[in-house]
Image (tube, rainbow, N blue to C red):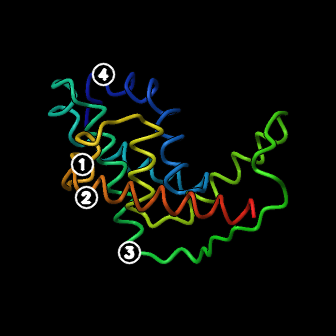
Amino acid sequence: MDEPEGFREFVAGRTDRLMKVAFLLTGDHHLAEDLVQATLVRTWRKWRQVGTDGQVDAYVNRILVTTYLSWRRRRWWGEVPSVLYDHDVAAADDPYDRALVADDLKRDLAALPPRQRAVIVLRYYLDLSESDTATILGCSIGTVKSQNHKALARLRSLTTDVLE
């Protein structure tokens, strides 16, 4: 089968961003690579339809998130997130401390249920609106708001537990 026009350029230009989003969703570099690959395979199949309508990024984001959520429903990953930090989160003045805080954030994200994690990544990492997030997740704006509220409350509680 012929390679769809523009697909190679799309992949070259978006792979880094897709890997970052996939890593934030999965918390694992290898799973992130698998997720991006699965997303691009599904995108390639429909490229002739979506590659021309100007909504490619929205389509790919939706595929990425729905693939991630379907993986989480099918498999038990054996991960048990923990909140055991050995440093003060507030002290992030030097690069080493900033790296530790980033590691803590990844650990905290891993403690969230998959849909809440997806909402946080879409809203705050990709800076999508509630409406766009709802479209990607296939739910209502009210669901996005409630999942966002619950996720932020959980992240706050994890941070508070560390600081006490």
Q: Which amino acid lies under the numbered mark 2 shown in the image of this protein?
A: Thr
On the image, numbered disc 2 is attached to which residue?
143
Image position, residue 154 (x, y; %): 52, 63
Q: Which amino acid lies under the numbered mark 4 shown in the image of this protein?
A: Gly
Q: Which amino acid lies under the numbered mark 1 shown in the image of this protein?
A: Ala
Looking at the image, tell me whether mark 1 or mark 4 is earlier in sequence order.
4
Looking at the image, tell me whether mark 2 or mark 3 is earlier in sequence order.
3
Residue in view at x 63 percent, y 70 percent? 81
Taking the view exactly as shown, the residue that stands out farthest to the front is 164
Q: Secondary structure at mark 1?
A: helix
122 sits to left or right of 56: right
Q: Is residue 51 above or below residue 109?
A: above
Q: Quadrant of residue 49?
A: top left
Image position, residue 83 (x, y; %): 69, 67
Asked whether disc 4 touches disc 2, contact meaning CB atoms under 8 Å apart, the reply is no
Foreground label between 2 and 3: 2
Q: Nearer the viewer, residue 68 or 157?
A: 157
On the image, numbered disc 3 is attached to which residue?
74
Asked whether disc 1 touches disc 4, contact meaning CB atoms under 8 Å apart, the reply is no
On the image, numbered disc 1 is attached to which residue?
134
On the image, numbered disc 4 is attached to which residue?
6
Q: Nearer the viewer, residue 144 or 13?
A: 144
Q: Is residue 157 above or below residue 120?
A: below
